Structures are given as structure tokens and as C-alpha cells.
């Protein structure tokens, strides 16, 4: 199936500002903006802090960012979310455990990109709650290539039906 999407922003950062740091002591590593990104099979984005991690690429929904802005009735710098790719047009949670293609790059959605409590400190109290279940997608690169900002097509064998801002349903298994 082909899904029209838009790639809005590409970001990388050489070091962690929140993850691995003492509670609410933010780092000062810059969030760098790009007009294109190159991906290598089995790796992340060159120079990014997650380049060699298990889940090297993170996606975030522009629709979720806009919903959070509406909830707080203010503009929020998209860089503060610290995700690599800001995308619109699909619900990212539907791609967990699935392969998908954007341009010539093949990704596999690995896990929900859980928000951290840092979001409350860096953006506004309540941001963590707003992002819960819709914090984005962690993915790995199956086949490398290059992506550029703009309108494109996401190809997936999965039929994607959910609204882009719908939260992932977290179920609890009885003990």
C-alpha cells in the first residue's frame, strides 16, 4: 500500500541532552537541522548519538506535536522533542514490528519511542502525559539510502487506518 506523507524536519545531535543525565540536568549538545539524511544498513544517522544503537532512528508525528501545542495553547520548538525525523500523514504506532519503505530506504519499526519525564522540564509540565502512547517510533535501517525533506510516499504491506494522533493502546497482562 502507498501512503502519501510529508517529511518535515530532519535532526541529529552528537550527544545526549536528557538520556543518561542526572534528573533535570540538561546537556548542551546542539540539535542540528538537515535538509537530507543518508542512512546505512544496520546503522543510524552518521554523527547522531544513536548511530550505533539497537534502535538508531526516531520518528515523531507532526500531528502529535500540533496537538500538544493546542493543548498548551502555545508554539513549541519541534527541536525540543529530540527525534530524528518529523513526519505527517500516518500513525507511527501502526508501524511497530513492520517493515516500510520511504524513498529508497527500508526501515523496520522496532518500538514505541516512549517519552521521558524530561519533556515536562524542557517543554512544559504535562508534556510527558500528552506524549504517552504517541511519542513516536524507534526504527532500524534494513536498506540504506537518502531521504530529503518534502512530500513523498511511504510503502507498507500493512493497511494503516488509525488517525495520526491516536495513542498506542498499552495493555496490561494480568499477573
Image (tube, helix red, strand yellow):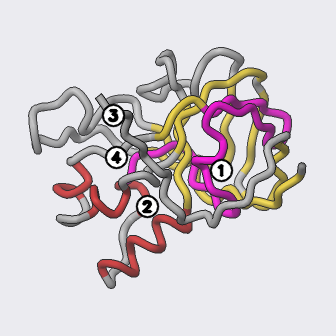
Give the CA distance from mark 2 to mark 1.
15 Å
**Residue 145 % position (x, y):** 78, 29
Name the residue rendered at 47%, 18% in the picture. 53
CB contact under 8 Å: marks 3 and 4: no
- Residue 174 marker: 3
Up-down relation of residue 118 to residue 120 (above or below) = above
Secondary element at image label 1: loop
Give the CA distance from mark 3 to mark 4.
24 Å
Give the CA distance from mark 2 to mark 4.
14 Å
Give, as a single range, the part of the protein colored magenta: 81-109
**Residue 45 % position (x, y):** 58, 28
Q: Which residue is mark 4?
A: 115
Q: Residues within 10 Å of mark 3 (few under 14, many from 20)?
A: few
**Residue 115 % position (x, y):** 34, 46
Residue 90 falls in which quadrant of the image? bottom right
CB contact under 8 Å: marks 3 and 2: no
Q: Identify the mark nearer the N-term, 1 or 4.
A: 1
Residue 91 falls in which quadrant of the image? bottom right
Amino acid at each position: 500500500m502507498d501512503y502519501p506523507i510529508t517529511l518535515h524536519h530532519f535532526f541529529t545531535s552528537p550527544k545526549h541532552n536528557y538520556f543518561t543525565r542526572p534528573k533535570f540536568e540538561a546537556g548542551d549538545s546542539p540539535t542540528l537541522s538537515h535538509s537530507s539524511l543518508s542512512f546505512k544498513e544496520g546503522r543510524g544517522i552518521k554523527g547522531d548519538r544513536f548511530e550505533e544503537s539497537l534502535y538508531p532512528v526516531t520518528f515523531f508525528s507532526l500531528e502529535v506535536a500540533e496537538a500538544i501545542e493546542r493543548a498548551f495553547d502555545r508554539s513549541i520548538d519541534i527541536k525540543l522533542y529530540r527525534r530524528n525525523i518529523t513526519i505527517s500523514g500516518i500513525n507511527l504506532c501502526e508501524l511497530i514490528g513492520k517493515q516500510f519503505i520511504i524513498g529508497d530506504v527500508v526501515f523496520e519499526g522496532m518500538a514505541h519511542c516512549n517519552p521521558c519525564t524530561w519533556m515536562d522540564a524542557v517543554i512544559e509540565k504535562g508534556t510527558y502525559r500528552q506524549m504517552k502512547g504517541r511519542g513516536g517510533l524507534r526504527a532500524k535501517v534494513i536498506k540504506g539510502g537518502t531521504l530529503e525533506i518534502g512530500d513523498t510516499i511511504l510503502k507498507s504491506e500493512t493497511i494503516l487506518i488509525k488517525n495520526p494522533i491516536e495513542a498506542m493502546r498499552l495493555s496490561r497482562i494480568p499477573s
